[in-house]
């Protein structure tokens, strides 16, 4: 039940192949890169004569230019790139860069056209607004130039000059043909009036003098402006439709190119941290042992003789270097779906060292057991089970986000239902299951009873004390499991001194078990004897002199001995440590009384809800309504609030009473290189 066996793999390959190799390894999700020390890497590069080449600078410039174009296209389309690199993304090639250039050029041209057209439409709208504002004034048309915000000129212009005039003024003016003889209406803003008149004079524009009777802005001019506005607005809408179609047609290409660019940038960042010479890279990392053969074959098929592969067994290094080496090897935990659901509890506390016993299977069993004892109700457990099944089946929405916890909910629900069946509790009601309980107890116990277990101290207080004794026994089992795991781990690491003489080693374990045995014999009425003095005394003496004894064992193994304290300090320290050991094991054991306490609390709460419902029931429809209401609210509170509290208590017991026995050092979680997801 230890972590997955790992291998250290070192690759020596050409620089031209590094992108393809990294892309392949990332797709396999099985290779954790080991980056060299920064100073060491730079020193090696200097010795090897590896310098930044013009090719590196050219690549950086090319990537920056492509990123700029992608950002422009994304802003133009109004699209947001994915935050993750999509699965199946490949390194960008020249064909992709060529498509990007074409799409970028088309977007730049279309944006320029849309901006110009938008400005022209705004100019016409402003001209129409001003023209209408003065169209009804009883003043000669020629006088409006003295105070209007818009400048309107009416005159004739050679037809072959109109196109050049439009190009020279751009969006600063609008020209509207009024007839087939070259009569035009020219309009601009007040601040653009000088430029308009200058260009009109250059083009040979001849201003027309309107009849003296014309008052205000001529209606024909306003109508012409409105017709022009409608036509230009349609053209703008057509351009916007073209933009939308362009985004729909090439949005996928843009996203794919963006993802490819992010992949290439990620690869460059990784490559920058690797050891390299002018022509080659050295890539080292960790890989599960069961994946080495397949990956090696794939790399050789891809690269042929252009790659050199070396594989190392970390156990050899651990045996030579000891604890430091074991902390360097990353840890990968693999479990069946039931055990994997509880892996988060372990990893939130710490990661086991490589080669140590994986505690997750124990956590899965102990969590389910403790939760069931503290939260026993058949109906409420069924609700938790249903929630777990819903999480497991959900494909989207809120429940799908918690799918990884579905198995934990399912197991907790089944455990709660089992305990509820034993103490005859169904949504806080202790009578509904009575007929079924009589059948089951009659079959298994030979005598029909209303329930297997009686948690409420009604007529049999002694049964309640037996139940608390049962929870203490569970505590002894969990504590013992932690101690055994710790001793095995220490022995596997060849830390024999710690495994034998520490408080969580063999000496402390014998002391703990002997005290438990004494307590059991006292309860059973057995007599204590002289052997108990030796049974307690020998472990205590060993624990008192644990420090020098560990030093002797370490010296025999050839390890560096720790500095010895003064005799007076050692004696005082040993006495304090003995007292701490006694308190440690006492508190660790008594902590499990809370399991019985919470189970009793759950039974009391259920009893209160059931009693309150019975009090308001009566024989009326209103009484039935209030009874159902109390049951619904009460059970909701129990499932939500007490369920959360019980979960916290179960996790706490695992952390402080189980993990504390063997989690003395943390390993490193296996994190394979991946650019997608």
Image (cartoon, helix red, strand yellow):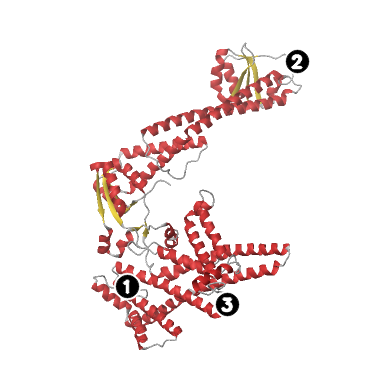
State whether residue 241 is above or below residue 322.
above
Q: Which mark is residue 213?
A: 2
Choose top left, top right, bottom left or bottom right for residue 456: bottom right
In front: 623, or 356? 623
Mark positioned earlier in the residue sequence (1 or 2)? 2
Q: Locate residue 203, reporting x and y percent.
A: 56, 15
Which is more foreground, mark 2 or mark 3?
A: 3
SS for callout 1? helix
Q: Are marks 2 and 3 in contact (CB under 8 Å)?
A: no
SS for callout 3? loop
Which is more foreground, mark 1 or mark 2?
A: 1
In front: 477, or 561? 477
Q: How many marks?
A: 3
> Which residue, given by chain and number where applicable, does mark 3 sit on?
457
> Which residue, given by chain and number where applicable, does mark 1 sit on?
499
Crowding near the residue tagged with mark 2, few <14, some 14–19, many ≥20 C-alpha atoms within 10 Å: few
Mark positioned earlier in the residue sequence (2 or 3)? 2
Mark positioned earlier in the residue sequence (3 or 1)? 3
In front: 580, or 431? 431
SS for callout 2? loop
Which is more foreground, mark 3 or mark 1?
A: 3
Q: Locate residue 428, reporting x and y percent.
A: 60, 67
Query: Real-space Cα distance between discs 1 and 2?
Result: 116 Å
């Amino acid at each position: 039940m230890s972590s997955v066996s790992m291998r250290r793999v070192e690759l020596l390959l050409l620089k031209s192949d590094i992108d393809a190799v990294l892309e392949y390894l990332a797709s396999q999700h099985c290779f954790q890169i080991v980056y060299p020390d920064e100073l060491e890497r730079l020193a090696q590069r200097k010795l090897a004569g590896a310098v930044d080449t013009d090719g590196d600078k050219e690549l950086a410039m090319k990537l920056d230019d492509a990123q700029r174009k992608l950002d422009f296209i994304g802003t133009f389309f109004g699209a947001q790139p994915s935050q993750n690199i999509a699965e199946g993304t490949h390194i960008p090639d020249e064909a992709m860069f060529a498509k990007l250039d074409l799409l970028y050029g088309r977007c730049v041209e279309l944006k320029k056209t849309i901006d110009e057209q938008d400005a022209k439409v705004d100019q016409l709208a402003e001209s129409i607004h001003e023209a209408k504002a003065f169209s009804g004034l009883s003043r000669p048309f020629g006088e409006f130039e003295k105070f209007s915000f818009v400048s309107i000129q009416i005159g004739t212009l050679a037809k072959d000059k109109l196109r050049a005039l439009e190009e020279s003024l751009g969006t600063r003016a609008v020209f509207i043909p009024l007839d087939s003889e070259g009569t035009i209406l020219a309009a601009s803003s007040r601040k653009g009036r000088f430029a308009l008149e200058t260009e009109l004079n250059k083009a040979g524009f001849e201003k027309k003098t309107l009849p003296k009777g014309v008052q205000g802005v001529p209606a024909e001019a306003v109508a012409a402006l409105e017709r022009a506005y409608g036509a230009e607005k349609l053209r703008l809408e057509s351009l916007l439709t073209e933009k939308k179609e362009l985004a729909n047609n090439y949005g996928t290409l843009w996203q794919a190119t963006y993802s490819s660019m992010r992949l290439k940038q990620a690869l460059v960042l990784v490559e920058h941290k690797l050891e390299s010479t002018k022509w080659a890279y050295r890539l080292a990392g960790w890989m599960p042992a069961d994946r080495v053969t397949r990956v090696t074959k794939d790399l050789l098929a891809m690269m042929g003789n252009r790659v050199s592969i070396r594989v190392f067994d970390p156990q050899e290094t651990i045996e030579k270097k000891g604890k430091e080496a074991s902390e360097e090897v990353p840890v990968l935990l693999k479990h069946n779906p039931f055990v994997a659901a509880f892996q988060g509890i372990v990893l939130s506390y710490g990661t086991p060292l490589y080669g140590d016993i994986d505690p997750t299977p124990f956590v899965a069993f102990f969590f389910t057991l403790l939760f069931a004892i503290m939260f026993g109700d058949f109906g409420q457990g069924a609700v938790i089970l249903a929630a777990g099944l819903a999480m497991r089946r959900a494909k989207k929405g809120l429940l799908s986000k918690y799918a990884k916890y579905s198995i934990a909910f399912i197991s907790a629900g089944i455990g709660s239902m089992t305990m509820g069946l034993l103490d005859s509790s169904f949504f806080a009601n202790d009578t509904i299951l009575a007929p079924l309980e009589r059948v089951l107890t009659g079959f298994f116990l030979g005598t029909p009873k209303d329930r297997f277990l009686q948690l409420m101290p009604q007529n049999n207080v002694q049964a309640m004390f037996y139940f608390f004794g049962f929870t203490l026994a569970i505590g002894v089992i969990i504590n013992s499991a932690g101690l055994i795991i710790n001793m095995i781990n220490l022995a596997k690491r060849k830390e024999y001194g710690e495994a034998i003489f520490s408080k969580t080693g063999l000496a402390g374990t014998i002391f703990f078990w002997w005290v438990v045995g004494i307590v059991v014999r006292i309860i059973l009425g057995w007599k204590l004897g002289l052997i108990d003095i030796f049974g307690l005394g020998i472990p205590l003496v060993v624990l008192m002199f644990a420090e020098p004894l560990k030093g002797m064992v370490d010296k025999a193994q050839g390890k560096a001995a720790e500095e010895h304290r003064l005799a007076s300090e050692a004696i005082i320290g040993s006495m304090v440590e003995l007292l701490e050991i006694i308190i440690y094991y006492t508190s660790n054991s008594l902590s499990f009384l809370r399991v019985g306490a919470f189970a009793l609390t759950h039974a009391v709460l259920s009893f209160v809800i059931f009693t309150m419902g019975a009090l308001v029931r009566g024989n009326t429809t209103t009484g039935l309504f209030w009874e159902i209401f109390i049951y619904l609210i009460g059970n909701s509170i129990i499932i939500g609030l007490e369920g959360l509290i019980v979960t916290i208590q179960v996790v706490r017991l695992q952390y402080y009473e189980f993990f504390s026995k063997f989690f003395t050092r943390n390993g490193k979680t296996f994190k394979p290189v991946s650019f997608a997801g």
